[in-house]
Amino acid sequence: MSVRAVRASRAATRYAILTVVSAVLLAPLVFMVSIALSSDQTTREMSFRFLPTEFEFGNFVRAFTADIPIGRFLLNSTVIVVVSCVGMTLSSALVAYGFARLRAPGKNVLFGVLLSTMMIPAEVLLIPQFILFRHLGWIDTLLPIIVPNFFANAYNVFLIRQFITRIPAELDEAAMLDGLGHFGLFRRIIMPLMKPVLVAVAIFTFTFNWGYFFGPLIYLNSEEKMPLALGIQVLSATSSGAQTPPWNMVMVGALILILPMVAVYYFGQKYLYEAGVVSGSAGLK
């Protein structure tokens, strides 16, 4: 067998394996779409088909009516992720700049302490945080979910600091000679150069908060304040034992939950590569 035939055979094998794996991974999504496009009668009878046989696109319109408040859940999720992305990106960038560029005794020790906080399980902090937020009167509001994002995150600080250390220090000296202070240097020189890593941090924050379920489950009681991830669960659990949950509308909500994350990753993946997140080049220095 010639070399060309061997290469063609290997390529065909790889494509066949990738096709099978892709089909297996996409199967749940196809079934989800099939359920989302099902009629109410099919939902009550639970007679779903793997491939769509009904095309009730009106289900997507009904999701934004007052009876099924998926639109309200979507609005709450949008508010949470937008404000959280702004808060997390700015706060992490400021803290990372301090660790990367400012000189202070014990800075490296503080950075080590900061990194060690990543080893603390979130469950350990749950009760103290709940008591704190209850004393502040934040229970059943969006504040316990949004405000912590304004206090940076150890992993994001580490990521941004490593990116800043790759920026030549000569830029700092030139900017200082032109009369810029640290804040001006951060805002006018460093921030524009950090665009890839800032976008990467925003993507991480968006992904986490868009599908965040545990926090809203603990802190929110009112249905009108729930984000989409929690609202979908409540929507599927509100039916009595004798009723079938509206699985078609639940799957509509699940699709609405998935699509923005896919779109954000698709359009932002180049920034993940530029920031060195995917290749793992943001190593310790």
Image (cartoon, rainbow, N blue to C red):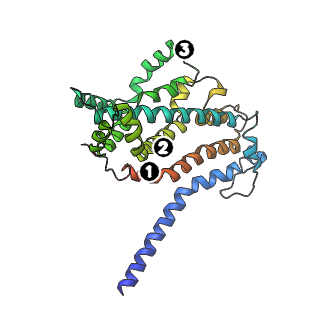
Discs 3/1, front = 1
Q: Are marks 2 and 1 in contact (CB under 8 Å)?
A: yes
Q: Which of marks 2 and 3 is nearer the N terminus?
A: 3
Residue 58, horizontal then vertical, whole percent: 77, 47
Residue positioned 46% across, 44% down in the render: 199
- In this rendering, does residue 126 appear at all? yes
Left or right: 176 as drawn, with respect to 124:
left
Q: Which residue is tagged 1? A: 271
Amino acid type, residue under disc 3 in the picture: Gly
In the image, 142 versus 45, the foreground residue is 142
Amino acid type, residue under disc 2 in the picture: Ile
Q: Which residue is tagged 2? A: 203
Residue positioned 38% across, 34% down in the render: 184
**Which quadrant holds the N terminus?**
bottom left
User: Within 10 angstroms of label 1, few (less than 14), some, or many (20 or more) residues?
Assistant: many
Q: Which residue lies furthest to the bottom in this view?
A: 1
Q: Residue 248 carries which label?
A: none
Q: Is mark 3 on a helix, strand or loop?
A: loop
Q: What element carries label 1?
A: helix
Q: What element carries label 2?
A: helix
Q: Are marks 2 and 3 in contact (CB under 8 Å)?
A: no
Residue 66, horizontal then vertical, whole percent: 76, 33
Left or right: 38 as drawn, with respect to 112:
right
User: Within 10 angstroms of label 3, few (less than 14), some, or many (20 or more) residues?
Assistant: few
Q: How far apart in space, not on screen, are marks 2 and 3 (Cα)?
A: 30 Å
Q: Which residue is tagged 3? A: 137
In the image, 7 versus 39, the foreground residue is 7
Image-quadrant location for residue 74: top right
Residue 205, horizontal then vertical, whole percent: 47, 38
